[in-house]
């Protein structure tokens, strides 16, 4: 488990670059929350965009999830298949709120430990900051595992833990 909500990996596939991108294009749709018809399509596994240079996708979910990883990737052609470079990270809004609340709680911790000399309140704030960050990592890694499993199944890989 990483100490940051970030994961990267490199996959080697026997599929060619057009085949990998073709598989992704078939199961990826651009997000349109105003169109209710796109929600019922069970062939769509990812939301996002797939281009010739790379892709920016996230797993399709029925309800919002703050810790859903954003998958950034690009595919390189090789003589025997392709190499897929993947980066999983939180969405920018989730990073902002995680950083904001971590800084607020750590600021209160510093205030209570340094200025006010109230170690009880400082300890509570520090515990809440650690709990906030720990839960964010836990939920990110849980969603990461689910997203990786779907992506691996899509390109015929086996997930080994």
Image (tube, helix red, strand yellow):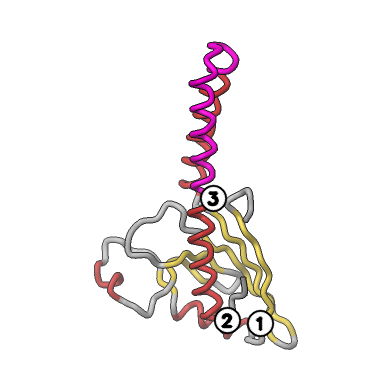
- Discs 2, 3 touching: Cβ within 8 Å: no
Disc 1 element: strand
Query: From mark 1 to mark 3, how far is it between C-alphas?
Result: 29 Å
Q: Quadrant of the N terminus?
A: bottom right
Residue 135 located within the stretch drawn in magenta: yes
Q: Residues within 10 Å of mark 2 (few under 14, many from 20)?
A: some
The quarter holding residue 74 reads: bottom right
Disc 2 element: helix
41 lies left or right of 82: left
Of the residues under marks 2 and 3, which one precedes in the sequence?
2
Q: Image point 39% across, 76% down: which residue?
A: 44
Q: Which residue is mark 2?
A: 20
Q: Which residues are magenta?
A: 111-137
Q: Image point 44% across, 73% down: which residue?
A: 28
Q: Residue furthest toward the right?
A: 79
Disc marking residue 13: 1
- Residues 129 and 53: in front is 129
Disc 3 element: helix
- Residues 7 and 29: in front is 7
């Amino acid at each position: 488990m990483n100490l940051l909500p970030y994961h990267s990996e490199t996959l080697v596939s026997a599929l060619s670059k057009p085949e990998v991108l073709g598989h992704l294009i078939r199961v990826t749709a651009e997000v349109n929350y105003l169109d209710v018809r796109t929600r019922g399509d069970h062939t769509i596994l990812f939301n996002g965009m797939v281009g010739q240079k790379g892709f920016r996708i996230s797993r399709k979910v029925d309800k919002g999830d703050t810790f859903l990883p954003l998958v950034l990737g690009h595919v390189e052609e090789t003589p025997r298949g392709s190499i897929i470079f993947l980066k999983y990270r939180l969405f920018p809004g989730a990073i902002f709120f995680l950083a904001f609340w971590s800084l607020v709680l750590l600021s209160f911790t510093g205030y209570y430990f340094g200025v006010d000399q109230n170690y009880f309140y400082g300890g509570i704030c520090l515990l809440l900051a650690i709990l906030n960050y720990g839960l964010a990592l836990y939920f990110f890694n849980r969603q990461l595992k689910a997203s990786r499993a779907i992506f691996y199944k899509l390109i015929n890989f086996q997930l080994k833990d």
